[in-house]
Amino acid sequence: MSQTVIDLIEADHRDVEMIFEKLKRQPENRPALVAELAAKFVAHARAEETKVYPELAKAKPSERGEVHHGVEEHHEAEELLAKLMDADPDKPEFMRTLEQLIKAVGHHVEEEETEILPAMAKAIPADKLVKLGRVFSQAKADELATPPKPVGRTKQELVDQAKEKGITGFSSMTKDELIDALSD
């Protein structure tokens, strides 16, 4: 039987969890594991955001809020991933950032697997979930085949988001301060 998009998304979640475990247990392999994690996470997030989430929002408009929330959680994780990529794998900062990333991704996965994916299973017929699985897989492959883009949002994107959320003092904040203010 063909796999549905839900099966593929859940398999990606398990794959990322295995990479997290390796990052904890294999300090000598951290640079390669971080690169693998970044490539896989970004490809997964972009494919969900461009191919999967819009289909759910179209099939069940009441899920638009959850879809938007899922995108926001991807951005938060990407910011932490960018910090992890910049951290020295042998310093305590690396493990602190890794733990933050694991917590953020774990929260997202839990919400996605208990709210978004079940809603998708109810709203989209099984044959379309299989087709969407192929579309999702191709979108990930396309993303992995293109040269890597910087992970995380630009400072201007963070400033724009801070304006939208009514955060005061954003114009004088550093990128890290903006990230902190937006995550509060």
Image (cartoon, rainbow, N blue to C red):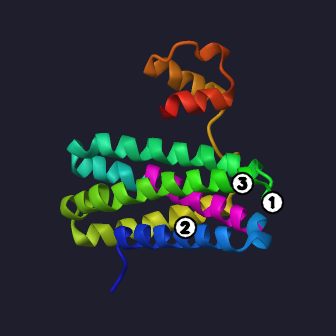
Find out whether the residues at labels 1 and 2 contact each other: C-beta distance under 8 Å.
no
Q: Which residue is mark 3?
A: 94
> For residue 33, which quarter of the picture?
bottom right
Q: Which residue is mark 2?
A: 16
Residue 129, compared with residue 46, is above or below; it is: below
Q: Magenta stretch: give its range.
A: 32-50
Q: Position of residue 146 (x, y in %)?
A: 68, 57
Residue 34, compared with residue 151, is above or below; it is: below
Amino acid type at image mark 2: Val
Of residue 34 and residue 50, the one placed in the foreground of this image is 34
Q: Could you tell me which residue is drawn at 72 percent across and 62 percent down?
A: 35
Q: Position of residue 27 (x, y in %)?
A: 75, 69
Residue 61 counted in the magenta span: no
Residue 68, compared with residue 116, is above or below; it is: above
Amino acid type at image mark 1: Asp
Amino acid type at image mark 3: Phe
Whether residue 1 is visible here, answered yes or no, is: yes
Disc 1 from disc 2: Cα separation: 21 Å
Dot 2 surroundings within 10 Å: few (below 14), some, or many (20 or more)?
many
Q: Nearer the viewer, mark 3 or mark 2?
A: 3
Residue 168, compared with residue 159, is above or below; it is: above
Q: Could you tell me which residue is drawn at 52 percent across and 66 percent down?
A: 138
Disc 3 from disc 2: Cα separation: 17 Å
Look at the numbered disc 2 and give the secondary structure of its residue. helix
Look at the numbered disc 3 and give the secondary structure of its residue. helix
Whether residue 148 is visible here, answered yes or no, is: no
Horizontally, residue 157 falls left or right of residue 54, namely right
Find out whether the residues at labels 1 and 3 contact each other: C-beta distance under 8 Å.
yes
